[in-house]
């Protein structure tokens, strides 16, 4: 059964609110703001890793294995991102030495983000970027690629993910 636009909107909104509340919950119970952010980032990244592994396993179960790391990254940019956000990554760059930079110029989970002070917005966005970093790392792990994923947020809603293969 095909989903309607209204059903998709409800699903997207529910995911947005769930992610916001999860980040909030992960930050509770710490004494300092830095400690709070670091702990929340680590927890969200671990949660994303587990979800990313499951999604990638399911999305690739009927596909042949990927030939090389570039094919895996192309899968993340096209199929995996389409599965998650109904769009592909806007830009993919590489230095041909195991580093890939994925840019999403209108990252969906940052579209509704605001802060009291505009200067704080990129800092807040970094904690929220931990889950998608984990999603990417988990998907890559599921596909047999060991990596580290770091997000950069210069201006919301743009987000850049840097993938380094180990």
Image (cartoon, rainbow, N blue to C red):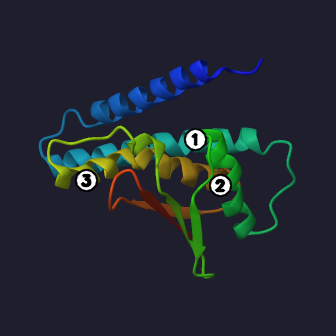
Mark 2 → mark 1, Cα distance in angstroms: 12 Å
What residue did someone put label 2 on? 76
User: Does 28 sit left or right of 95 as displayed?
Assistant: left
- Assess whether mark 2 and mark 3 are in contact (beta carbons under 8 angstroms): no
| Disc number for residue 123 | 3
Q: Can residue 166 be seen in this view?
A: no
Task: Provide residue 160's location: percent of width, then percent of height.
Answer: 45, 61
Q: Residue at x 64, y 56 (%)?
A: 77
What residue did someone put label 1 on? 85
Task: Provide residue 104's location: percent of width, then percent of height.
Answer: 50, 56
| SS assignment at label 2 | helix
Whether 95 is drawn above or below 18: the answer is: below
Q: Which residue is drawn at 39% across and 27% down?
A: 17
Pointer 1 or 3: first along the chain:
1
Task: Provide residue 33's location: percent of width, then percent of height.
Answer: 15, 47
Nearest to the eye among marks 1 and 3: give it: 1
Pointer 3 or 2: first along the chain:
2
- Assess whether mark 1 and mark 2 are in contact (beta carbons under 8 angstroms): no
Q: Can residue 104 be seen in this view?
A: yes
């Amino acid at each position: 059964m095909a989903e309607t636009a209204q059903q998709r909107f409800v699903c997207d909104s529910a995911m947005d609110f769930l992610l916001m509340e999860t980040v909030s919950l992960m930050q509770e119970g710490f004494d300092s703001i830095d400690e709070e952010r670091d702990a929340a980032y680590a927890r969200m990244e671990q949660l994303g890793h587990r979800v990313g592994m499951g999604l990638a396993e399911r999305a690739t179960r009927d596909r042949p294995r990927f030939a090389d790391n570039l094919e895996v990254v192309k899968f993340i940019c096209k199929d995996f991102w389409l599965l998650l956000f109904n769009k592909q990554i806007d830009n993919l760059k590489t230095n041909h030495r195991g580093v890939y930079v994925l840019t999403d110029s209108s990252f969906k989970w940052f579209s509704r983000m605001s802060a009291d002070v505009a200067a704080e917005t990129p800092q807040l966005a970094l904690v929220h970027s931990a889950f998608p970093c984990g999603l990417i790392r988990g998907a890559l792990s599921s596909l047999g690629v060991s990596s580290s994923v770091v997000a950069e947020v210069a201006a919301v809603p743009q987000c850049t993910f840097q993938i380094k293969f180990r």
